[in-house]
Each structure stands twice: as C-alpha cells, then as structure tokens.
C-alpha cells in the first residue's frame, strides 16, 4: 500500500509504541519532508498514577525508539534532539543505500505485534531452557535483564 507521504508509515510505527495505561500521550507534527516533532500531550497525562509524568516521558522515549527503527527500515537515519520541555525533534536523512541489519529488521518486525496484556497470569513457572534463551538474547551493555524466582527475596 502506498502512502501519499512517505513518512506516514514511520509515524504510524511510532504510534504503536507502548505507553502508560495505553494513554498515547504524544503529538506528532510533520514539519517538512524530513523533520518530525514529537511532543508530550499533557491532556492525556494520568496524574493519579503518574503524578510526576515519569511514565508519560518513558512513553515518548518508546515512541521515539519505534520511529527510529521504522526510519532505518525505510532508508533513513534519525537524528534526535531533545528540548527541555520533553519535545523531541527528529530530523530524517535519506540514506543512498538502506542498511537493513538483522537486528533492526527483527526489532522493526515486532512493532505491529505489540500488545498489552492485563490478564491474570497462571503462576506456571517459565521453563528454565526458555528463560535461559531470553536472558541470553540480551543485546545491550547498558541494559540488564534479571530473572527472580517468586520465592527469592529480590522478588
């Protein structure tokens, strides 16, 4: 399906980002054919559960990450600039050759499958082999993933 604006699918991917209580507290503005502004929408803030807007700004970070992944998938690099009020200016630069790394493709492919699950879990432990695979998939030196048994004091 073709879009009249080539940046529309990039923005659509960003809107699929997770947000606190699915509030989607963002506003996107397409300033020209290569600049997008992502601003907090404080009319969607949740003061009862997020009095200091922490979750709201985490949601904006998630939307920015989705936008950056989609931009790479469509042949752009995304240069982001954060403004003091939480607004993010994203300038897209068309790349002559699209760099489709396996990691970018794998992450981008998951965007349409994101969903929120508020169901009660059945307390069945995750099999150790599956848990080991999840922990081994950690791809970052700056983010750590830890698993705790329900009986562990850390839990």
Image: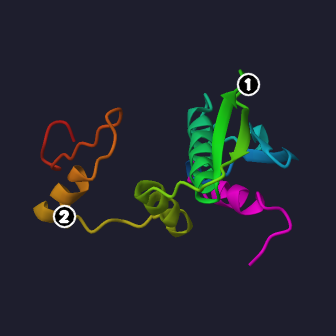
The circle drawn on residue 75 is none
Q: Quadrant of residue 73?
A: bottom right
Query: Residue 92: x, y in percent?
Result: 72, 44
16 relative to 88, above or below:
below
Question: Between disc 2 and disc 1, whose residue precedes?
Answer: 1
Q: Quadrant of the N terminus?
A: bottom right
Please rate how many residues cluster around mark 1, counting C-alpha atoms within 10 Å: few if below 14, some from 14 to 19, many from 20.
few
106 relative to 33, above or below:
below
Q: Quadrant of residue 77?
A: top right
Task: Look at the image and give the residue range highlighted in magenta.
Answer: 1-19
Residue drawn at x 51%, y 58% is 100
> Left or right: 155 with respect to 113?
left
Q: Residue furthest top?
A: 84
Label 2 – label 1 distance at C-alpha? 42 Å
The secondary element bearing badge 1 is classed as loop
Q: Is residue 7 magenta?
A: yes
Instruction: Say if residue 14 shows up in the picture.
Output: yes
Q: Quadrant of the C terminus?
A: top left
Query: Residue 99: x, y in percent?
Result: 53, 54
Q: Nearer the viewer, residue 96 or 38?
A: 96
Please rate how many residues cluster around mark 2, counting C-alpha atoms within 10 Å: few if below 14, some from 14 to 19, many from 20.
few
Answer whether labels 2 and 1 touch (C-beta < 8 Å): no
Write down the residue under mark 2: 130
The secondary element bearing badge 2 is classed as helix
Write down the residue under mark 1: 85
Residue drawn at x 65%, y 42% is 78
Query: Residue 88: x, y in percent?
Result: 71, 34
């Amino acid at each position: 399906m073709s879009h009249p604006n080539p940046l529309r699918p990039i923005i659509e991917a960003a809107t699929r980002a997770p947000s606190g209580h699915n509030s989607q507290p963002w506003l996107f503005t397409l300033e020209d054919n290569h600049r997008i502004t992502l601003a907090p929408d404080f009319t969607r803030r949740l003061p009862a559960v997020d009095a200091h807007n922490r979750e709201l700004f985490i949601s904006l970070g998630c939307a920015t990450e989705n936008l950056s992944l989609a931009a790479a998938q469509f042949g752009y690099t995304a240069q982001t600039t954060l403004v003091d009020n939480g607004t993010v200016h994203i300038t897209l630069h068309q790349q002559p050759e699209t760099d489709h790394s396996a990691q970018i493709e794998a992450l981008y492919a998951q965007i349409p499958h994101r969903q929120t699950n508020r169901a009660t879990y059945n307390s069945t432990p995750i099999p150790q082999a599956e848990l080991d695979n999840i922990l081994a998939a950690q791809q970052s030196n700056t983010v750590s993933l830890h698993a705790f048994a329900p009986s562990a004091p850390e839990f």
